[in-house]
Image (cartoon, rainbow, N blue to C red):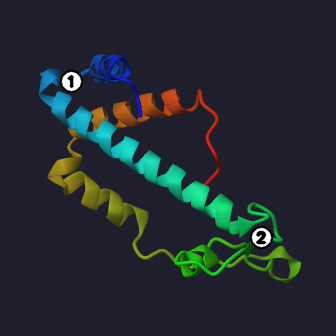
Amino acid sequence: PMRREQKEHFIRQCLHRSHIDEARNYISTIRGLIQEVEQSYVLSMKFSKVKQDLIQDNGTTFARVIDMSPFTPLLQSFLPKRVPNFGLVYSDPPEHPVAELLDLHLRNPTSAEDVNGVTMAVWRRYLDEVSRHQILDT
């Protein structure tokens, strides 16, 4: 988790770069987003540690689950799949066309331009901050 000074600096930078009117109204939203991102990050790091501890040769084609544990059924889905003949990979068709999803998001009031701008600024700043650190590949 980020220190308080870092969070305050982060919020000031987000508000400054978002270029929206009455930016101070979004401080609590930004704090909530920071908290949500931190919680997701902590959970992903915990899960990454569990994967590393319970999957032998994790990240290779020889990966296998070490023991039978409560996480075994979940971890099975993270093992590498057999490569098909000739290396051809088939994908599933999309559930919704991109234009339909974009139209839905534009009509959704929580995706208003100013809210979206602040959210993108928060994520952009957070990713800039995170990219300075070495993070395990999950």
Quarter holding residue 83? bottom right
Residue 121 in sight here: yes
Q: Which residue is mark 2?
A: 63
- Viewer-proximal residue, 54 or 91? 54
Q: Is residue 50 left or right of residue 29?
A: right
Q: Which residue is mark 1?
A: 20
Q: From the image, which quarter does the N terminus lie in?
A: top left
- Which residue shows up at 73% across the image and 72% down it? 80
Q: Please provide percent x and percent y for residue 103.
A: 28, 59
Q: Please provide percent x and percent y for residue 37.
A: 38, 43
- Which residue shows up at 33% across the image and 57% down it? 102
Q: Amino acid at mark 1?
A: Ile
* 68 relative to 33, above or below: below
- Viewer-proximal residue, 71 or 126? 71
Q: Please provide percent x and percent y for residue 53.
A: 66, 61
- Which residue shows up at 58% across the image and 61% down it? 50
Residue 21 in sight here: no
Q: Is residue 120 left or right of residue 108?
A: right
Q: From the image, which quarter does the C terminus lie in?
A: bottom right
